Amino acid sequence: MQKGSKTILIIDDDKILCDTIRDYFKNASLEIITASTGRKGLQICSKRKIDIVLLDQRLPDAEGHSLCPSILRYNEQTKIIFITAYPSFDNAVKAIKAGAYEYLSKPFELEELKLTIHRALRTLELERTEQLQNYRNIKESEEAVLIGSSSGIAEVKKLVHLAASVDAPVLITGETGTGKNLVAKAIHFSGLTANAAFVSINCAAIPENLIEAELFGYERGAFTGALTTKKGIFEMAEGGTLVLDEIGEMPQYLQTKLLGVLDDKKIKRLGSDYIRDVNVRIIATTSVDLEKAIKEKRFREDLYYRLSVIRIHIPPLRQRRQDIPELCDYFIQKIAKGREVRLPGSEIDRLMEYNWPGNVRELKNILERAIILYRGTTIRPSELLVKTGEMSETSLFYSNPNSSTFPTLEEVEKNHIKYALNHFSGNYTKTAKALGISLSTLKRKIRRYGIV
């Protein structure tokens, strides 16, 4: 049997029919099993996963429709194709009511059976995809929790509640690692479209020559390499939420197209003249100072105002240190997974004294490393922090809270990248992984800031 093949069980005492069906599908990726009685068929269903059952009405030991509930009890996703002669049409109706997927009247053409099986397998695939998506949505909604009780996070929670009640565009700002994508998830999963699609795309992670095709889709032959027609992310997010992560990195020509989509709710695939209506809620996030980018002509001012109907700024962790104990409790429970882990009060004090240039993401990373490295019940994450004498320029910006000199977000990011590169001896791959960004994003930022 080929890997990934589907299994079909034929429950029918007509050996000629069983052999004919087996021969017809011998070159397909299907495993064909046969059973001549209802009892044998149920035994097979009880021992292994069956994708499709071809079930005859007249069996030596049972009426076919009476077996449907038992078959589905063993595997509720099995698709039952009921086979009946015309005089037993009423039994076909009974089988459908009992859970059969479809029925065929004898005699039937093998091509008709092939099409019916194809539809059943397609339905099975779609159901499993939907179940997987529903599971992911449940897990993501459970994790879309904003931890903390500081005034800064309280304001964020208030705005999240407001944004969830409307479908206006939202702009989420904050330094790298503050949890912008988490806030976007909190808006989606607490809103009216919680069961709809939630799609996120990092505008900085996709090469500039591909991002338009990713967003809007394309028709076959639209450009070299476009061998098939493909939906864009706007279409995939229909009826739900589309998060444009790091919107400040979006090329300017696409900013114009995005503004048109926000105004008209219409898109056009590359290589197509057909205009499609889209109903998508846009949430944009950025760690870039967009107001500065506007002054430098790198970001459209009209798009900025169109996106920031509701604006949510997430304060850096150093400005809400009182949330650190609560965040530690939350992350330890998630990471330890039942293992007894103790974080001494002295450790919490040291964590609260640290400036956290990597924000909440860095805190989670430090705790995870500590839980892995320390085998006892007591962990000491402060020992994994950057020592005072080794602090980056980013951390040193905050050594004097009364200083009139205050860094911009870009200065913080630039110096944090410089420190990380130095820490990993110039290894781009390790640096990108530690910073939680893609390799292409890191290279783009290095070129942008002129880091050598």
Image: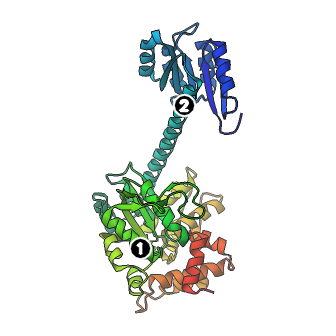
Looking at the picture, tell me which residue is in the foreground, 108 or 211. 108
Q: CA distance from mark 2 to mark 1?
A: 46 Å
Residue 438 horizontal/vertical position (percent):
58, 69
Q: How is the image coloured?
A: rainbow
**Residue 226 visible to an observer of this rendering:** yes
Q: Residue at x 33, y 54 (%)?
A: 191
> At label 2, which amino acid type do we have?
Leu
> At label 1, which amino acid type do we have?
Gln
Disc on res. 327 = none
Residue 362 horizontal/vertical position (percent):
54, 70
Residue 429 horizontal/vertical position (percent):
66, 71
Q: Which tag, 2 or 1, sits closer to the chain's start? A: 2
The correct choice, above or below, for 36 with respect to 346 in the image is above
The correct choice, above or below, for 412 with respect to 276 in the image is below
Q: Secondary structure at mark 2?
A: helix
Q: Residue at x 44, y 48 (%)?
A: 138
> According to the image, label 1 marks what residue?
255
Looking at the picture, tell me which residue is in the foreground, 44 or 276. 276
The correct choice, above or below, for 225 with respect to 427 in the image is above
**Residue 147 visible to an observer of this rendering:** no
Q: Quadrant of residue 187?
A: bottom left
The correct choice, above or below, for 277 with respect to 433 in the image is above
Residue 423 horizontal/vertical position (percent):
65, 79
Residues tagged 2 and 1 counted as in contact (Cβ below 8 A): no
> According to the image, label 2 marks what residue?
115
Looking at the picture, tell me which residue is in the foreground, 278 or 49. 278
Q: Dot 2, crowdedness within 10 Å: few (<14), some or many (≥20)?
A: few
Q: Secondary structure at mark 1?
A: helix
Q: Nearer the viewer, mark 2 or mark 1?
A: 2
User: Hey, which residue is sitting farthest bottom in the picture?
Assistant: 404
Q: Quadrant of residue 52?
A: top right
- For the C terminus, the image quarter is bottom right
